Image (cartoon, helix red, strand yellow):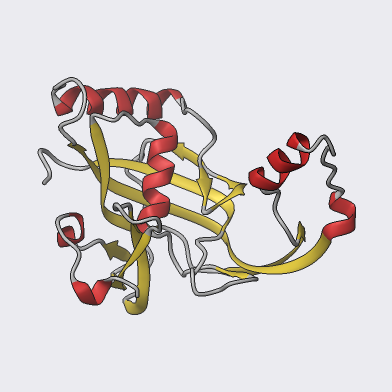
Amino acid sequence: MPYSPPLVVKVWGDYACFTRPEMKVERVSYEVMTPSAARGLLEAIYWKPEFQWQIRRIHVLKPIRRAAVLRNEVNSTASPKTIRSAFEKGEGYAYFAEDDRTQRHTLALRDVAYLIEADAVPTGRGAADHPAKHRDIFRRRVARGQCYHRPYLGCREFAASFAEPDGSEQVIDRTEPLGRMLFDLRYGDSSRNVPVFFNAGLQDGVLHVPPHLYEHVAPAEVAP
């Protein structure tokens, strides 16, 4: 539950791709940033095990525009098991990316900007620090442009810039349902992670994340 007004950070970039998980090969982005992408971006700026980021609202600051990108990728990924087995047999391992090239399309977003509102909620792990400590550290890191690694907008190649809001930000005038959107992955005792979805929508240019998603998972929201 929130302990004080949410922290707010402005993020923007030339391109973004918040991939729909139902697209298996070629990436197609959601219309706006997802809560899980926003959480990952904030963790790139500041993260500690004593708290977790809970996204409350995502304000869309620029019109939603799409861009088709054609990229060179590879068909397969290196398997640690295969590499270890090859070296144990004394065979060595060689992989030539040029022999495994393929081209894939990405339907991304271009020229994006968002305001992210989030709470730093204590997890009960580690030292019992007051939440205000982490809030102050986060504000200082944003003001100085500090981060653990460069934040990105969905895909690592789409780097994000971030800063404190200056008060001049204006959300887009758009209200519409966006359909089912990925909220996050639940990490349980099972070997696989369970994706959680919710019915998303823009209300006057703002994506509101239902607070109950951070409290429990309704059966209808969990993908089979």
Instruction: Where is residue 212? Give x, y as percent.
Output: 15, 61
Instruction: Where is residue 205? Give x, y as percent.
Output: 33, 66
Find residue 101 and report its image quarter. bottom right
Name which residue lies at 60% across and 65% down. Answer: 108
Residue 79 can be seen, yes or no: yes
Most foreground residue, 191 or 201: 191
Q: Is residue 79 above or below residue 211?
A: above
In the picture, measured across the screen, residue 99 lies left or right of residue 211, that is right
Q: Is residue 12 above or below residue 28?
A: above
Instruction: Where is residue 56? Give x, y as percent.
Output: 23, 53
In the orientation shown, which residue stands out farthest toward the front?
89
Name which residue lies at 32% across and 79% down. Answer: 177
Most foreground residue, 24 or 189: 189
Tell me the quadrant of the picture where the C terminus can be found. bottom left
Find residue 216 and report its image quarter. bottom left
Q: Is residue 56 above or below residue 197?
A: above
Most foreground residue, 209 or 76: 76
In the picture, measured across the screen, residue 92 lies left or right of residue 66, that is right
Instruction: Where is residue 84? Give x, y as percent.
Output: 69, 39
- Please tell me how many numbered marks the rendered image carries: 0
